[in-house]
Amino acid sequence: MGRPNVGKSTLLNALLGQKVAIVSSSPQTTRRKQLGILTVPEGQIVFVDTPGIMKPRQALDKHMVDVATSVFGDADIVLWVTDASELPTAADEHIGELVARAQPSIPVLILNKCDRLKPEQADARIAAYRALAPAAKGLLVSAVRGDNLGEIVPLLLSLLPEGPQYYAEDEVTDFTLRDMAAELVREAALVELHDEVPHGVAVVIDDFVESPDRPAHVTAILYVERESHKGIVIGKGGEMLKRIGIRARREFERQLGSQAYLELHVKVREGWRQDENALKRLGYGEKDEG
Ligand SMILES: Nc1nc2c(ncn2[C@@H]2O[C@H](COP(=O)(O)OP(=O)(O)O)[C@@H](O)[C@H]2O)c(=O)[nH]1
Ligand SMILES: [Mg+2]
């Protein structure tokens, strides 16, 4: 857990050695809780990727923060990911308090993005974050460049209690292919749209047909909050929607290991992020929190 945009999902993908979680340069990319399962000869670690913790402004934000904090009680270890290239913020102080309260979960502090840190800054920066979580073991890493990533898993294995193996060796996430398809379309939209339709896009898979002799056929609906956003997402002559589709399909085919056909539609659901019922229908309901 941690603030939005510090690199939690990037770190998860790096530790698993494959992409399960979507990543973008916009905060609040991760909306749902997602498991990443790592099985090594010494044991199995079930990572729980969560939405970033921030001050909720809308019903969707509140739902996301609830999802993030709800996993605390279940975890053996709370892995607090921070952005070492920035000084701790008020939000980090707040999260530090949550981490302290999450005990008996064992706190581990990950200072990420050390590739952006000047060597002479490192000591002071480590001290600033450590002050917020004095009980935590800490590591300075870069999820993107790979610095010190190899130390995380051995540290976690040394701290974890013994328990049953919950998942089969070949399971890497609890997201289905259908979930992945929806997430990859949303990731493509976030990347292609930059901040134009900031976080008003939700993606629902309307149809998913897999057959042995033909490419998978996926129909996805992108819900936007306003009529004017629909035009932006579609773009001039459908150019933007085409770019989103190409990017999402490329990633999805990589995951699938075979060809896929992706059909995208855009619909307006007025103010859906403020609307509890719409949130549930768009996949951000209670069922995710279980
Ligand atoms: N320079 C640098 N950027 C990173 C690192 N880890 C993640 N990022 C970038 O930070 C942004 C947010 O990453 P993401 O994993 O979506 O963050 P999350 O919101 O915490 O899950 C993306 O643009 C990533 O490429 C890192 O170690 N170094
Ligand atoms: Mg994330």
Image (cartoon, rainbow, N blue to C red):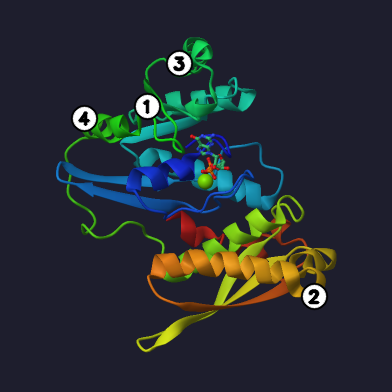
Q: Earlier in the sequence, mark 1 or mark 2?
A: 1
Q: Is residue 262 above or below residue 174?
A: below
Q: Which residue is mark 2?
A: 237
Disc 4 and disc 1 in contact, CB within 8 angstroms: no
Question: Which residue is depicted at the point 58% across and 57% down?
Answer: 187
Q: Earlier in the sequence, mark 2 or mark 3?
A: 3
Q: Regarding mark 1 in the picture, which secondary structure is present there? A: strand
Q: Which residue is mark 3?
A: 130
Q: Which residue is mark 4?
A: 158
Q: How far, Cα to Cα, is label 4 from label 2?
A: 56 Å
Q: Earlier in the sequence, mark 3 or mark 1?
A: 1
Neighbours of disc 1 within 10 Å: few (<14), some (14-19), many (20+): many
Q: Is mark 1 within 8 Å of ligand 1?
A: no
Q: Is residue 197 visible?
A: yes
Q: Is residue 282 visible?
A: no
Where is residue 257? Give x, y as percent.
Answer: 37, 70
Where is residue 14? Give x, y as percent.
Answer: 39, 44
In the rendered view of the protein, which quadrant contains the C terminus?
bottom left
Q: Which mark is nearer the camera, 1 or 2?
A: 2
- Disc 4 residue type (three-letter): Ser
- Disc 1 residue type (three-letter): Pro
Q: Is residue 132 above or below residue 143?
A: above
Tell me the number on the disc at residue 107: 1
Q: Which mark is nearer the camera, 3 or 1?
A: 3
Where is residue 37? Give x, y as percent.
Answer: 31, 51
